Amino acid sequence: MGQAEGNVTPRIPKRRSVTDRRQQIVEQAAEFFARYGFDAGTRDFARYLGTTQPLLYRYFPTKEALIREVYRAVYLDLWDENWAALLTDRTKTLRERLIEFYRRYTDKIMNSRWMRLYLYAGLKGVEINQPYIRLVEERILSRIITEFWLEQDRQAPETVGAEDMEAAWILQGGIFYFGVRRFVYDVPTYTDKDAMIANAVDMFLAGYGDVMRRRLG
Amino acid sequence: MGQAEGNVTPRIPKRRSVTDRRQQIVEQAAEFFARYGFDAGTRDFARYLGTTQPLLYRYFPTKEALIREVYRAVYLDLWDENWAALLTDRTKTLRERLIEFYRRYTDKIMNSRWMRLYLYAGLKGVEINQPYIRLVEERILSRIITEFWLEQDRQAPETVGAEDMEAAWILQGGIFYFGVRRFVYDVPTYTDKDAMIANAVDMFLAGYGDVMRRRLG
DNA sequence: TGTGATAATTATCGATCGATAAATAAATCA
DNA sequence: TGATTTATTTATCGATCGATAATTATCACA
């Protein structure tokens, strides 16, 4: 090693391909386990990969370790920091912000891989959903409520109330369930995603506004 | 057999207890598989039942047959015919009807057994969800839209439009997702079920009314 | 071209799966 | 009570599971 050559471009170290291979296995494992569930066998997965089963154990010590990596790849660093700025950009109406946010957000999560893995994780009790739910509540739902109050020229409450949080969850859940119908139940939907989002946001703004006004008199 | 006795009350045939046992196994299998998924082993289930594994095969030819019976028990005859009358009872306001309907409806489906089995079935592609989705659309969502139009003194459309159906799905999905959070993700909710339903219905009526009026000008 | 390192394969382990056969316990009835 | 049926158990099957060991193919480099 350490042989100096006149050639300027360094050779790509062999190690690199090993890391790439690992990455590729994780990527395809996400697709495979999303489709067949985590109880699917390692032999079937190896065939899906186009190799043999013992090869997997050169890259991951156990099947569980591979699955952990799948979760990491799909859920880690999901949150785009631009989304926070988007939700609070008061040069636009809240309606515009919400529609834009939910379009970008669902572009990232509304696919069969993300949604199916998420529900598998929820049913298995994997420690993925609960932190994610907290993230949704803290970075999306609380913010939506606060921004709504601010746009109504009312003082935003220091802490978002229970009914307000559940109201925001109706919006979030209604939109999310559109993806469940498509990618888990595999039934056709009546409009495309963007139309559904615009509709859901409009209904929320009018509906929540009405409920809130009635509550405050 | 055929022995005549002076006693008036006929003896309970021995067969009966076998049928009861079958019923009881199915009932407990629903609980068990809802909790651990359908890939859980028959030995673990037998231990859960308090018996031994081969006994199951005297009542069900295969594990798959047992699972089929679980689905039958949980999803067959779910629909209560009174619900249809409830939704169209025009002596009450639509708001009252919707709140009452969703309370009764969710009383039946919002439990860990029903919801978890339903999502397991969806992920496995079992032929349960798609007929159920059709039932929801035909008997609940279309009816809600129609009743809404009638209460607004507008002529109800002969067929419910795509955007209207998706609007009703926002309500249904928003309510349903409350149950998913509770019984699948196992996270705390902020209000009880009845408060959430009243809130969701109020938001839907105001929100959908506003969207519809704007669409029609 | 030959040699050492490493990736990928074949062969195989013990454990567990659904399912069956044989043995036993319990209940029924003359 | 004794014989017969039926419910339940013990013992075990072949298949498949995750995981490991031994073997073979591949490739960089002197």
Image (cartoon, coloured by chain):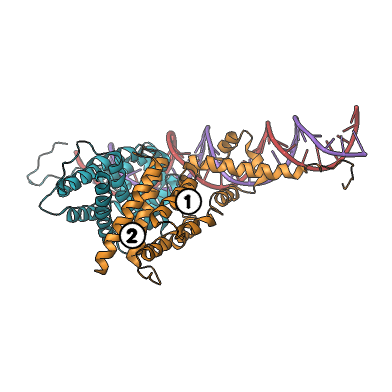
Chain colours: A orange, B cyan, C red, D purple
Labels 1 and 2 share a subunit: yes
Q: Residue at x 61, y 48 (%)?
A: A62
Q: Nearer the viewer, mark 1 or mark 2?
A: 2
Q: Which residue position holds label 2? A: A167
Q: In which quadrant will I find the N terminus of chain B?
A: top left
Q: Are marks 1 and 2 in contact (CB under 8 Å)?
A: no
The amino acid pointed to by label 1 is Ala
Q: Residue at x 90, y 42 (%)?
A: A6
Above or below, C22 against A62 in this view is above
Disc 2 packing (10 Å; few <14; some 14–19; many ≥20):
many
Q: In this rendered view, identify the residue nearer to me: B150 or B211.
A: B211
Closer to the chain start, of discs 1 and 2, is 1
Measured in 3D between alpha carbons, the distance from the residue under mark 1 to the one under mark 2, in whole angstroms, is 25 Å
User: Can you give x and y, in whole percent of width and height, for residue A89 in the image?
Assistant: 47, 59
Residue B90 in view here: yes
User: Residue beneath label 1, please?
Assistant: A121
Q: Amino acid at mark 2?
A: Ala
Chain at tag 1: A
Query: Mark 2: which secondary structure?
Result: helix
Q: Is B107 situated above or below B160? A: below
